[in-house]
Amino acid sequence: MPAANDLRKGQVIKFNGEPHLVMETQHRTPGNLRAFVQVKMRNLRYGKSLEQRFNSPDPVEVLPTDRRTLEFSYADRETFSFMDPETFETFELTAAMIGEAKNYLVAGGKAEVLFINDNPVTIDLPSTVTLKITESADGVKGDTASNVQKPATCETGLVIQVPLFIKEGELVRVSTLDGSYMGRA
């Protein structure tokens, strides 16, 4: 087993019998004390984040993982279906696994899925996605003195703030990090 010193961002470790995704590691050597590794990780089963300290030489169980780029097919209540474009194999992820990413999933959209022992565990979206505006109020004529924005509803149900010139039916790029408008597509 590798030591805590060898942990890197993106690895999945087994901690307290649960799989955890390592989000950040810091190696610290305070004054005259022994060195330790501060790890920020997220429980892949429940989604909760936590910070844990490991002594540098402590053994840590790293789980074998696989990342695949899958294509989103459809959503059926609390189940989201993805297909591998190479093998045409389908995978179903629950709403708990998807989380807030459901606001950015459109049919045919690509997403990177993390697998542990051939079981899908979590999803990573690209930094921006293209969404169609389905509902948007008309802008007030003459209200262009400053960067005025209005709410608009996307095809996934996500409500974002867009400039006044965006109309229904237009395609816009949206950031998956904070849900902000990035520009026309």
Image: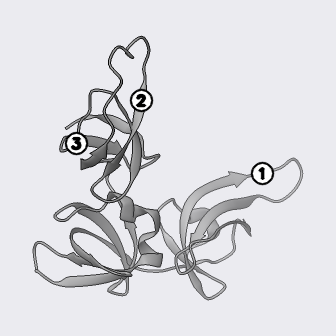
Furthest residue in direction top, as rendered: 145
Q: Would you place residue 146 above or below residue 77 in this image?
A: above
- Alpha carbon separation for disc pair 2 and 3: 15 Å
Mark 2 surroundings: few (<14), some (14-19) or many (≥20) residues within 10 A: some
Q: Residue at x 41, y 80 (%)?
A: 64
Horizontal relation, residue 43 to residue 36: left or right: left
- Relative to the observer, which residue lies in front, 5 or 88? 88
Horizontal relation, residue 171 to residue 30: left or right: left
Going from N to C along the chain, the mark reached first, 2 or 3, is 2
As shown in the figure, which amino acid type bears the numbered disc 3?
Glu
**Which type of secondary structure does the marked residue at label 1 adopt?**
loop
Is residue 158 among the parts visible in the rendering?
Answer: yes
As shown in the figure, which amino acid type bears the numbered disc 1?
Thr
What residue does disc 2 label?
Answer: 149
Q: Residue at x 24, y 61 (%)?
A: 106
Could you say which disc has been placed on residue 29 in the image? 1
Give how far across and how far down residue 14 sits, in percent.
Answer: 57, 81
As shown in the figure, which amino acid type bears the numbered disc 2?
Gln
Q: Which residue is drawn at 40% across and 34% down?
A: 150
